[in-house]
Amino acid sequence: DAGVIQSPRHEVTEMGQEVTLRCKPISGHDYLFWYRQTMMRGLELLIYFNNNVPIDDSGMPEDRFSAKMPNASFSTLKIQPSEPRDSAVYFCASSLAGNSPLHFGNGTRLTVT
Amino acid sequence: EDQVTQSPEALRLQEGESSSLNCSYTVSGLRGLFWYRQDPGKGPEFLFTLYSAGEEKEKERLKATLTKKESFLHITAPKPEDSATYLCAVQAHSGTYKYIFGTGTRLKVLA
């Protein structure tokens, strides 16, 4: 299995631009999680899906962030408009069941200037 | 509020020098405690799951233990390739399957 695939690996954009991060989970995994990692705050859960349905989005910082999962093999995290404080590494992870270990992608490093 | 605290923040060991990393947690009913390893530029990689106090898991030079308030990751005779950040996460018996992560311990093993 190829594991969780994220794209792009790096994204540099200017403040105010729209940013879209993409994730392909492991086939057969029913849960998909989006995390943000910074040195100061570590890994923070943004949102997670079960069978393509958003279950808990309490970690989404504000209305500028949105996430979708149109099918079992694809999810997006969108930031519009982006701000410098959004600079971080964004990870997607999937799991077979709700209490199964997470399998992470290698992340997208976002820099907003 | 559910919380996870890891210590120390950073640890430098000589090759072969055994030590332990700590993960203290406060959670309203533990569903599971997870240990991950993260190498620079990569996503965390799963190591162990512990479910109840007294449980232990081992893998090569690593052994994870669990009490009602904390977990330890014991590293026996570490090698330079064990250098990484080690993350602890908990999942509570709540209505959701949220994982709460600690900020990790950065381990450096010197040859």
Image (cartoon, coloured by chain):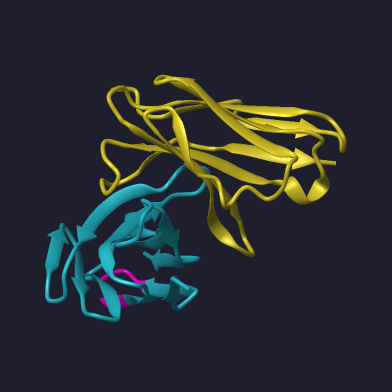
On the rendered structure, is A113 left or right of B3?
Answer: right
Q: Residue at x 30, y 78 (%)?
A: B70
Quarter the C terminus of chain B occupies:
bottom left
Magenta range is B14-20
On the rendered structure, is B11 left or right of B23?
Answer: right
Q: In front: B8, or B69?
A: B69
Residue B45 lies in magenta, yes or no?
no
Question: In the image, which lettered chain appears cyan?
Answer: B
Residue B16 lies in magenta, yes or no?
yes
On the rendered structure, is A31 left or right of A14?
Answer: left
Figure check: A52 above or below B57:
above
Q: Look at the image and give the colour of chain A.
A: yellow
Q: Position of residue B35 (x, y in %)?
A: 31, 59
Q: Is residue B17 among the parts visible in the rendering? A: no
Q: Answer with the quarter of the image where residue B34 lies.
A: bottom left
Q: Position of residue B26 (x, y in %)?
A: 38, 77
Q: Position of residue A78 (x, y in %)?
A: 67, 31
